[in-house]
Amino acid sequence: MSSLFRLLPGKAVRVLPSNNAGLNKLSLCGNRGILSTSTTANLNFGSRYFSSKTKHRNIGISAHIDSGKTTLTERILFYTGRINSIHDVRGKDGVGAKMDSMELEREKGITIQSAATFCQWKDSHINIIDTPGHVDFTIEVERALRVLDGGVLVLCGVSGVQSQSLTVDRQMKRYNVPRVAFVNKLDRTASNPWKVINDLRSQLKLNAAAVQIPIGLEGEHAGVVDLIDQKAITFTGEKGENVVVSDDIPEELKEFMEEKRTELIEKLADADDEIAELFLMEETPSVEEIKAAIRRQTIACNFVPVFMGSAFKNKGVQALLDGVMEYLPEPFEKQNYALDRSKGEEPVLVSGKPEDSLIALAFKLEETPFGQLTYMRIYQGMLKKGNQIVNVNDGKKIKLARIVRMHSDDMEEITEAAAGEVVAMFGIDCRSMDTFSDGDMNLAMSSMFVPDAVMSLAIKPANSKMQANFGKALAKFSKEDPTLRVKVDNETKETIISGMGELHLEVYIERMKREYEVDVISGQPNVNYKETISSRSEFDWLHKKQTGGSGQYAKVTGYIEPMTEDEQKELGKTNEFVNECIGTNIPPEYYSSCEKGTNDAFAEGSLVGSEVEGVRVVLKDGASHAVDSSDMAFRICMAHAIRDAMKKAKPSVLEPVMSVEVEIPAEFQGTVVAGINRRMGLINSSDMSDDGSSVKVMAEVPLANMFGYSTELRSNTQGKGEFTMEYLRHLSVMKNVQEELTKKFKEEKENVA
């Protein structure tokens, strides 16, 4: 018998027996919507559901903020019998959704951390990760999509593709994640699923087509018509648990259904050769041929089937689950590659078989009252309690003491887990993205993309007695979240935290107070500027120092020049060091020291002390001394040479520019656009909704000018406006701003001195 443990920080652990009580009350199986059931609270989600013969799906639910991801996950858990009541994100009962287990998430009504759960739908097992929609917590989406085999892209039926939808799409494409789309909120006024599908095609460049059409929109939304099976599906009962499938399609929808079914086959023919051949021969493919083609091309990332409904009104969720099982891949069907470290990181296809040697990836860390909880995706082999595994990155051997399956903040102990599963373990000291094996091979899984921080904040504990907990909190948070950087300023000795935005840093300050009882005093937010050059500059630098005994001697010559954005993308890095030395004027053993000196110079620019990017350094020649030359001498010489050359190369300061999306009632458009212009923003587009009631404004605004914008927007729109922003790129600041920033930096240095 397995046990469920609920994580309650600082409190006793409540043990819930996971037995088969209640199974005799089921008329067919444990899924709501297939049958009626009087209780599901004690369904056993133990090993009987997870045999090697069971179908598996590992999916992530991702979308723009407030598109309904967590609400959809709540319905999935209810209909699969995983929870026995529905609680909404901002529900009147104050309980909050199951997957928003953090108190802060329930207060703010947003998802902050990705949460994992598992459930059973019909004869299949599904691992689900619910991810945040806010751009400040984009790393949670990144790490989830890195280890999952499929995704559900949730889109608002009114707003369509929004800024974070674009980010999620880029992340899914980066890791080749097959996805289905779900157009949500069709019960809302002005919902239009066909506009959303056009957005998918035009903005995300996806070959998307509807596999359903809605039966009614807005207040009349009752269900969907399946275009493939040509059946009407309606959802009745207090919580939409009764699914009624009927051949009686509403008369007014029959012609529209035929039109959209033809469009589906046309779009499928663009991707699939078998359907294209039938289409050209003017033959109608069978239901089985259509479904097989959708599955093939979805797994190949060439097609996106679009489902429809309203999670909040309990419509369309069960049909979406059927689509997940029908069209998204089994773990072994998605190709994953490990890197063979013994052969220069040559890619090796992972088999996905449980009988092969173990390969597992730690993708998320979490501190609990029981110690560090490490989330692990098993790509190959088996994890068994009591067995020994090896961290490929540092060679440490670890004995598996506890393996658990997660259900938000609940956990169930298990004894083993096979390839394709997502589990968590205690007692493992590692870092995020470490690879584990059983010691038979030297393969490592590739890491994930970690975006640069865009905002910094100086913080300190309100009381010196809190210093110990302050340090513990920062160590824990920076280990959990790769986008949170912590450093101590060498000159002011202040602790600086850097992250993805105001909300990101605010949440960690609030978590310090709640979880570690540390009150934090924070300074004004600082924007993460960067520096670059705009012209070529030669350098010829001699470093000579004699202090008695062996001294220091090094000479370097060469030039620096700016790099274009395309060159940086092609190289995969923002700066480049090129060694064009001929002969041995600089002994070859000092080349690496010259490169290190270059990196030292790039760490802090001369204008505002920020990181330097977009610079190519070409080392042409130099000189050395038989006695006085050393690694340190060439490193110091190169750093001085680059710093001096950058001053002559027309240096400039770069500031982060944000892509800002503002949604407002139409009557406030003039005021809001004027406000963006005052903040030196560039308006890219201003789109009116179909009914003319609201406007979506897309703009590019410097991050330094966005502080306090949420308050201004609320006051200008009577609280009806909302906005989101995400990092776009770094651009040069205006000349007067650069002069102000440079002057401020020099004054601060003088004050410290």
Image (tube, rainbow, N blue to C red):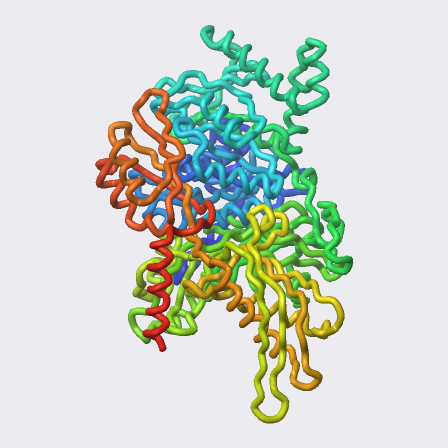
Which residue corresponds to the image point at 31% horizontal and 43% vertical from the top-left?
Answer: 94
What is the count of numbered marks? 0
Comparing 81 with 235, the one in front is: 235
Where is residue 271? Give x, y as percent: 66, 25
Is residue 115 something that shows in the picture?
Answer: yes
Side (left or right) of 70 relative to 260: left
Residue that extends furthest to the bottom in the rendered view of this protein: 548
Which residue corresponds to the image point at 34% horizontal and 36% vertical from the top-left?
Answer: 662
Where is residue 691? Give x, y as percent: 33, 20
Comparing 155 with 547, the one in front is: 547
Comparing 186 with 610, the one in front is: 610
Q: Is residue 490 above or below residue 483?
A: below
Q: Is residue 499 above or below residue 150?
A: below
Side (left or right) of 297 relative to 697: right
Q: Is residue 265 above or below residue 736?
A: above
Is residue 239 something that shows in the picture?
Answer: no
Comparing 97 with 351, the one in front is: 351
Where is residue 233? Give x, y as percent: 49, 19
Side (left or right) of 666 relative to 566: left
Which residue corresponds to the image point at 39% horizontal and 61% vertical from the top-left?
Answer: 11
Q: Is residue 740 above or below residue 593?
A: above
> Which quarter of the image is occupied by the C terminus?
bottom left
Where is residue 22? Give x, y as percent: 49, 38
Which residue corresponds to the image point at 42% horizontal and 36% vertical from the top-left?
Answer: 71
